[in-house]
Amino acid sequence: MSESPFPARQCALARELAGLDLHALAVVPGASLTYLTGLDFHLSERPTVAFFRQHGAPVFVIPELEEGKLDGFPMDICVCTYGEDPSIWPEAFREAARAGGLDGQRIGIEFGSMRVLELRMLEGAMPGSTYPDGHEALAALRICKDAHDIEKMRSAVQVAEDAMGHTLSAIEPGITEREAASRLTARLLDAGCAPEIPFPPIVAFGPSSANPHATPDDRALRSGELILCDWGANVEGYFSDMTRMFTYGDPGNDARHIVEVVGHARQAAAQTAGPGVPASEVDRAARAVIEKAGFGERFVHRTGHGVGLEIHEAPYIRDGNPMLLRPGMTFTIEPGIYLDGVAGARIEDIVAVTEDGVDTLTALPRELVDIAAR
C-alpha cells in the first residue's frame, strides 16, 4: 500500500500559508478538502468548515451526523460538532475559534467556494479576524499532480473507456441522444464510477454536434450522421474527461474531413506541450492547424483546461495565457470545429506534463469509428 499523501500536503500548505502571512485557511467541502484529507463531505444546509493552520492540528466544525466519517482518520485533528438546532451552531464555531486560536487572525478563504452561510458563521465566531482570499495557497499545490493524483486519474480514464466500450453496441439508428446518454451513465456506474459523475455525458447526433455543449434530447440517430460523445468518470474524487467521434454508416467526405483536421490539431498541440512551454503556445499550435484548413472561425473555445479533483481547473490552455507548463500539470487537449446546422467534431484527451513532453492518459482510438462496422 502506498504511503498516504495527506500529511505531506498539509505540511506544504502550512509553508504556503506562512508565505502569505495567513494564520489558517478555512476550507468547505469540495475539491480542496478532498485534496488535503481524502475525506468526502458534501455541501448542505448544515455548515461544515475545516481550518488548516500554520501550526497545530486542523480544526473541524461538522454536524454530529457526519462524525462517523472521521472514524479511523490517521491524522490528529480537533473536532467540534453540533446538533440539528440551528441556534446552537454558532457555539461550535466559537469552540473551534478557541481551540485553534483563530480570533484576531488572518484566516484565508477560497472566494470561489466559500458560501455566505459559512462566512457568516466565521464572522460571528471570530469578529476580530479578517478573511482575505487564500485560494493561492492551495492553487500553488494542486496545479501539479503527484503520483497519487495521476494514478487515480488513470483509473478514472479506464472506467470511462470501459463504459464507452459497453455502450457502443446500443447505439444504432432510432436511438435518441437522451437514451444513449442514459445508457452511458449507467455503464459508467457499472464500471466503477462514483455516483457523483463529473458532468452529464454529452451525446450529440448530426447537427446537434455543432453545439459544443449540447444537451442530449429526443433527437433520434439517423444513418450516416456524426456522433459526438463527451464524457468522464470519477474515481475517489479524481476526474477524467474525453471526447470521441463516431458514426453509424458513411457520413460523407466533408464530415470525415473535419474529424481528420481536428485530429491533426490535437496531435500538433500534444507535440508542442511540455515543460517550460507557455499554455498559449499549445493553444496556438492547435488553432494554426484548424485555421490552415479554413475553419479558424469555427473553433470557438479554448484548446483545453486543467482537470483533476475538479473538471475545470488551472492550467487553462488558451490564447494569451503566459503560464509555463510544469511537470505534473494535467489538462485536456480538445480542439473542435463546429458547422452550424450541419455537424461538429471534437477530439479530447487528457495529458500529464512530464520532464520531456507529455504523457497521454487517454487511450481510445482518436480516428472516426463507424459503429456499424464493428
Image (cartoon, rainbow, N blue to C red):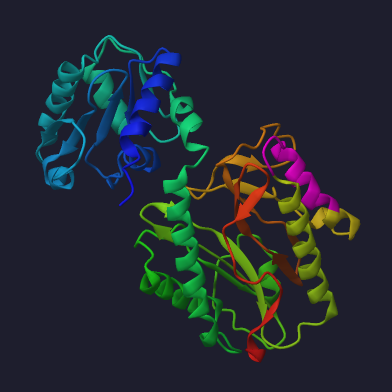
Q: Would residue 260 appear left or right of 241 to someone viewing this image?
A: right
Question: In the image, what residue occupies the spot 24% across and 12% down?
Answer: 103
Is residue 194 covered in magenta? no
- Against 351, residue 319 (above or below) is above
Residue 72 location (% of width, % of height)? 15, 45
In terms of depth relative to the viewer, which is nearer, 100 or 128? 100
- Against 69, residue 90 (above or below) is above
In terms of depth relative to the viewer, which is nearer, 165 or 119? 165
Q: Main secondary structure of the magenta part?
A: helix
Question: In the image, what residue occupies the spot 41% across and 58% down?
Answer: 234
Is residue 282 covered in magenta? yes
Q: Would residue 296 appear left or right of 344 to someone viewing this image?
A: right
| Residue 91 appears anywhere in the view | yes
Residue 259 location (% of width, % of height)? 76, 69
Q: Which image quadrant is residue 36 in?
A: top left
Q: Would residue 32 appear left or right of 168 to someone viewing this image?
A: left
| Residue 199 appears anywhere in the view | no
Q: Would residue 360 appear left or right of 266 to someone viewing this image?
A: left
In terms of depth relative to the viewer, which is nearer, 134 or 328? 328
Q: Which image quadrant is residue 94 in?
A: top left
- Against 294, residue 86 (above or below) is above
In magenta, the rendered stretch is: 274-288
Q: Which image quadrant is residue 245 in?
A: bottom right
